[in-house]
Amino acid sequence: MTLTAPSPTHPSPASPEALIPEARRRGRRRALRRAVFALATVLVAGTALLTALAASSASGGHGLGGAGAVAASAPRVTTCTGRAVVEPSTLTLSCADANAALTATRWSAWATAAARGVTTFAVNLCTPNCASSPLRYFRGATVVLDRPVATARGERFSRAVVTYRSGSIDHRYVQLLTTGGQA
């Protein structure tokens, strides 16, 4: 009686059939490394862009999408923290209770008499009362900052007028702004 070894069910390590799955694994690993590298590159570039935009906003710069060059003599708007800024993308209008704010604002003009832009207007409509009512957001609202006043630190806009639509009705919200003190 002669015993014969059973035929192998797995290909030998040197056979071409064994090399194909390994080549596929290496190809997938290379593709994964390239994807991770591309993602890391995008994240680094995005972080750099956000840092530059934050620095621009913090310094009162224009950021992207602003009205362009603003004259050095153009009035500023005073934030609730007392900073004077030009073309802010967000601005709290009612500093005492934060019940009205501009968000995602794009300025189309910033001049000596007035500043104009399009914004998302956030306001507490106080329904049923101010304490329990959340802010409501109105996209596509228009904002005008006007009535510049002279202060010890330069011209400041003293009024904001926001026009927004609720349902089919246009509403107007007028807020006197803090100016940081008169000259």
Image (cartoon, rainbow, N blue to C red):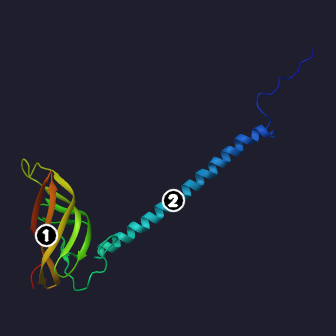
**In the rendered image, which quarter is residue 175 located in?**
bottom left
Quarter placement of the N terminus: top right
What residue sits right under mark 2 in the picture?
40
**In the rendered image, which quarter is residue 114 located in?**
bottom left
Question: In the rendered structure, which disc, 2 or 1, sits on the residue that comes first in sequence?
Answer: 2
Q: Is residue 44 left or right of residue 174?
A: right
Q: Which mark is residue 42?
A: none
Q: Amino acid at mark 1?
A: Ala
Which residue is at 42% across, 64% downward?
47
For marks 2 and 1, give the CA distance. Answer: 43 Å
Q: Is residue 87 visible?
A: no
Which residue is at 34% across, 69% downward?
54
Quarter placement of the C terminus: bottom left
Is residue 122 or residue 15 the one in the foreground?
122
Residue 163 in picture, x, y percent from top left = 14, 63
Does 3 appear above or below 156?
above
Give the residue at the far top of this rendering.
1
What residue sits right under mark 1 in the picture?
160
Which residue is at 18% across, 82% downward?
112
Q: Is residue 108 visible?
A: yes
Does 182 appear above or below 57?
below
Q: How dense is the environment of label 2, judged by Cα within 10 Å: few (below 14), some, or many (20 and up)?
A: few
Residue 123 in picture, x, y percent from top left = 15, 57
Residue 34 in picture, x, y percent from top left = 59, 56
Q: Amino acid at mark 2?
A: Ala
Numbered-mark total: 2
